[in-house]
Structures are given as structure tokens and as C-alpha cells.
Image: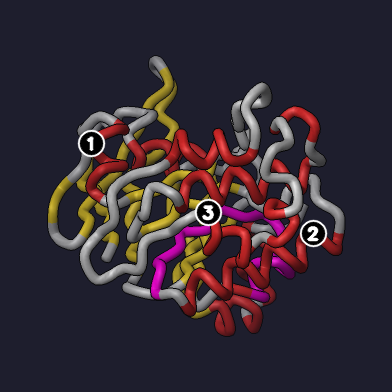
Amino acid sequence: MLAVSGLHAHYGRAHILSDVALEARQGEVLVLLGRNGAGKSTTMKAIMGLVPPSAGQVRLDGADLAGQEPHVIARAGIGYVPEERRIFTDLTVMENLAVGRRPPRACLAPWTPERLFALFPNLGEMRNRPGGRMSGGEQQMLTIARTLMGNPRLLLLDEPSEGLSPLIVEQMANTILQLKREGLTVLLSEQNLHFAGLVSDRATVIEQGRIRWSGTFAALEADAAAQAQYLSV
């Protein structure tokens, strides 16, 4: 579904991404792993058009979206859940969900508030609560739910487990597995190897803006040398 090739990106004169290539297949969870500052979030932002690529292709079902505006990419079917959450703190849960609403897509069951409350029961109990009066875990759930209201075919999840309690992390893993069962393709950015192992089919490892390793997650778990070289602190 998603094919990224030859992707380069800069912040000013700093060359951040160099020849990044990865593929996410229909209905799978691909995890992008790397240390803090390795280029994971920049890769997500370059795919989404928030950081304009200086070279390369970003293909969704064969259509090249590289260089398009973020709203065009979102309408094409890519949903982005940023690391910083960025909910509207003055708006209620229902109002935040309304902000993300987009028309349904062919061959996908449309996301509605009631479907999302089944996925995130906590949100259903606080539908009229302002976002600023929610815990960090609840805000993370709301950010994902708001993005799903756009009915994406591909979901970019940037560090969803960061700063969350172990119980909420477990709930987040169950949520990602449920989204996979719904047929959604997920590109997950993570540092937490254990969390990634709970949900991921395949892994791609990035270091200093370059892809260093790709394969099944089981193969990465068995490759102690790659883990030590690219993922250990």
C-alpha cells in the first residue's frame, strides 16, 4: 500500500533523511525503530508533507504523493497521529471528533463516534469533557480517534506509547491490533522494542537518517547484533 523510495529531507541546510526506503503492505503493522533523533518523526512528517521532501517518492497504492500539501495527502487516505498529540484542549471529546470527520471511503466501514467509543470505552464516558481536562493516555486515545474520523486507509502513529503508564500501553497495543483486524495499515514509529513486538509484523530500523535494517520482527528479535548496534542506548 505504501512505498517510500529515495526519500531525502532537510531542516534548513541540515540533511536529515538520506535515501530512506520502506514499504507497508495492506493490513499489516510496520514499525519504524530507532534511537531518539534517528529520523523516525521526520520520516513520518515527510510522508505526510509536513516536512517537504527534497527528493524521493511517497506512493500510496501507486499514486505518488511526495511534495503534495498535507491536506491533499490526508484526503488521499493517510491519517497522521503526531507524537505531541495536539488535541484541541478547549473542545470536548465530541467536538474534537467532529473536527476530524471526513466522508467514508469505498470498501471500508466508516468510523463513527459510537464505533470509536467501542474501541476506546474511556472516551465514551467523557464525551462532553474538554480535552484539557483529560489524562495523557486519554488524550492519546482522543488523538487516534480524531484521526480515525477521517477514515484513513493508512495510519501513521508516531511514538504512541511514550510517557504512558504500563496499563495504558497495554490498552494501546490492543487498540493497534484491533485496527489491524479492521483492515487498516499502520506505520508505527517507536523506541520501545517490547511494545513494538506486541503489535508489529515487520520492522525497519533507521539510524542517522538512513535505513540500516529491514525484515520481520521475529528476525530482528533474533538479531542481537543489530539491536546492540542500532537500538541500544
Is 64 in front, or is 205? 64
Residue drawn at (81%, 41%) of the image = 135
In this view, 232 is above or below 202: above
- State the mark number for residue 168: 2
Q: Position of residue 98 (x, y in %)?
A: 47, 38
Q: Which residues are magenta?
A: 183-198
What's the residue type where badge 2 is placed? Ile
Q: Is residue 192 magenta?
A: yes
Q: Dot 2 surroundings within 10 Å: few (below 14), some, or many (20 or more)?
A: some
The residues bearing labels 3 and 1 have C-alpha atoms spaced at a distance of: 24 Å
Q: Decide: marks 3, 1 in contact (CB < 8 A)?
A: no
> SS for tag 2?
helix
- State the mark number for residue 72: 1
**What residue occupies the far left of the structure in this picture?**
63
In this view, 112 is above or below 10: below
The residues bearing labels 1 and 2 have C-alpha atoms spaced at a distance of: 33 Å
Residue drawn at (80%, 50%) of the image = 164
What's the residue type where badge 1 is placed? Val
Q: Which residue is disc 3 drawn over?
A: 113
Can residue 127 be spotted in the picture?
yes
In this view, 122 is above or below 173: above
The residues bearing labels 3 and 2 have C-alpha atoms spaced at a distance of: 21 Å
What's the residue type where badge 3 is placed? Pro
